[in-house]
Amino acid sequence: MNPDFHYYATYCAAFLAGYSHEEAMSICYSDQFVDLCSKSLLSKLRAPLEAATTQLQLELMDAMTDIVGLQDITRIWASFHFLPRDLVAEPPRHCSVLYRNKYRLICGPNGELLRMTVELARNKGLQAVGIAMHILADTWAHQYFAGTPSMVINNTNYHFYELLTENGKEIEKKISFRHSASAPDDLEKSIYTCSLNHDSENSIMQLGHGRAGHLPDYSFIRYKYLPAWGYYEEIIKDNPSDYKHAFCQMIYAMKYLRGEHESFETKQYDTAAVAPYEEEIEQIIRKRQLDASEDWKAFGEKLSGQTIEPFDLEKYQSEYTDAAPEQKDGTYLGQFLIAALAQKSMVTNQIFQTGSRLAGYSINYRKKGLKGVKAYHKLLEQTKGGEDS
Amino acid sequence: MSYFQRLRSAFSGLLILLYVVILLLLPEQGYALAVLLLSISLLIKGVRKLIYYFTLARHMVGGKSVLYHALIMIDLSIFTIHVASMTSLTILIYLLGIYVFSGAVDILRALEARKYGTHFWKLKLINGIIGVAFALVLFVIGISSHSTILMLIGYCITLVYSAVLKILSAFRKTAIVYIQ
């Protein structure tokens, strides 16, 4: 997903869930910050690198694809952008343990990990809410891809068709891909940019939805293709429907986080909150455009009657860097980093417990004490006596 | 490309250059060494591909191509060992044949890239066509003149070319799509 949804649409969902303008701004800032909190930025802020929630182009280019490098990549992308739907899933055919472990990382909505992610954010700061909403929304947009470099899971081939309605008739238009990262996607000619087809299982080119380009990030598009893991069964990806589900589920989840619901259950969507604005939201989602920020912004401002300021990466940086060491955790970014560490710790632990080492090792604090990466000690301070690892 | 991949690419380029020197100074021993090295590398690649197919790729859409790739490599490796006992002319013709094959693969990959709609297929196509044409010209010259010298020099030129490409690719920037 792009800033249009992670920032502006999240603001709208937060406001509809009952948060004030200021609270909604904090939540949508945190949501969008997930896509920018890289090791490079954390290094500049002298913050714990383990709290990174994304990797930049250059970081990925130089990422080691040895076992440790792959585990680092998987921890970041599976925890924040491609949350696995079912960690105990069994592939339809008999397979090796390695294949099964990769198959289980396929992202999708309404999984057990999503429930744990939302519950983890309860009674935490607004930054944790923003992170959880980012992950929730991405489970819809990024479904069918895994947050680990894998050709056998994430590869696609030339069988890609956009599904359009012209003069009331459903038509299929062949999608062409190119590999020029600087060239914008051409909606008229259905030419999109995707990562190169590198004939290597662990190539960075095979991470997430890189091989399908930005198609999962556009709310308007409907398309069909053959996922590498799908045994030649076509998948129809209906982004307008998925994005609407994501929006309604975000409202439901945030109402739970505000205490309006006792528990968070998957497959629940707050369609009632959306009903008065359904037509407007449908229009924004279905509008054929690369960036829907202006439309979501206008809708959000109409809802709250307040101005939504544009995202500013620098906004909270000086507060964090100027704070005394013992006060850093209390700043906006300090709270974000703790929430990010908690999320990464939880997802890594869940993957580890299935016997998979694709996201690395997880040490149970109660059994082994503080033997893990030092950055996670912060979590202990926050959750005294907790089981975080 | 990771640091290790860059290092591997540069190192293999340098090894090829070293091999060219051996081939030009000691052609007879060079032929046998060439065939042996080629056979071993094909065997290793083939077996690795085979393991990859049976553990992972057999579940993948289009995964059969990995199996065919592996079998062709192992088959070529076995055949290459048998070539070692033949005359230097036959060995050179075989090596040029391998070069034609690699050029043909380049052409096929370029056509595949074109099928995807990318604009970056032309360079690969030209590369493949030049490779195939160059090897065929050397083949015709070698057969008509019954001389291995020209063929040897031509083969060394192709090796130097691929060594330079490998070294250059070790320093190349590899742009990828940033996924958000």
Image: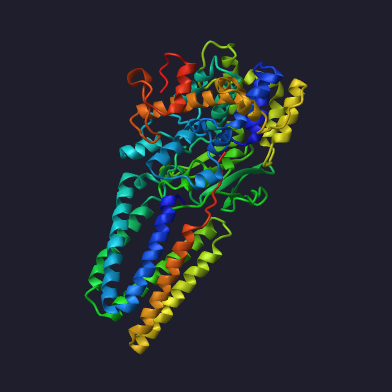
In the rendering, at what x and y percent does residue A388 appear? Answer: 42, 21
Q: Nearer the viewer, residue B68 or A364?
A: A364
Q: Residue at x 60, y 49 (%)?
A: A192
In the rendering, at what x and y percent does residue A215 appear? Answer: 58, 42
Asked whether the viewer can see residue B132, the reply is yes
Q: In which quarter of the image is the N terminus of chain A?
A: top right
From this view, report whether residue A102 is shown above or below residue B173: above
Q: As drawn, which residue projects farthest toward the front? A: A324
Q: Residue at x 51, y 48 (%)?
A: A61
Tell me: A220 left or right of A355: right
Q: How is the image coloured?
A: rainbow
Q: Which residue is drawn at 35% across and 44% down?
A: B56
Q: As drawn, which residue projects farthest toward the bottom? A: B145
In the rendering, at what x and y percent does residue A346 appear? Answer: 44, 24
Q: Residue at x 55, y 25 (%)?
A: A132
Q: Quadrant of the C terminus of chain A?
A: top left
Quarter residue A16 falls in: top right
Q: Which of A381 and B102 is in front in this view?
A: A381
In the rendering, at what x and y percent does residue A116 appear? Answer: 47, 21
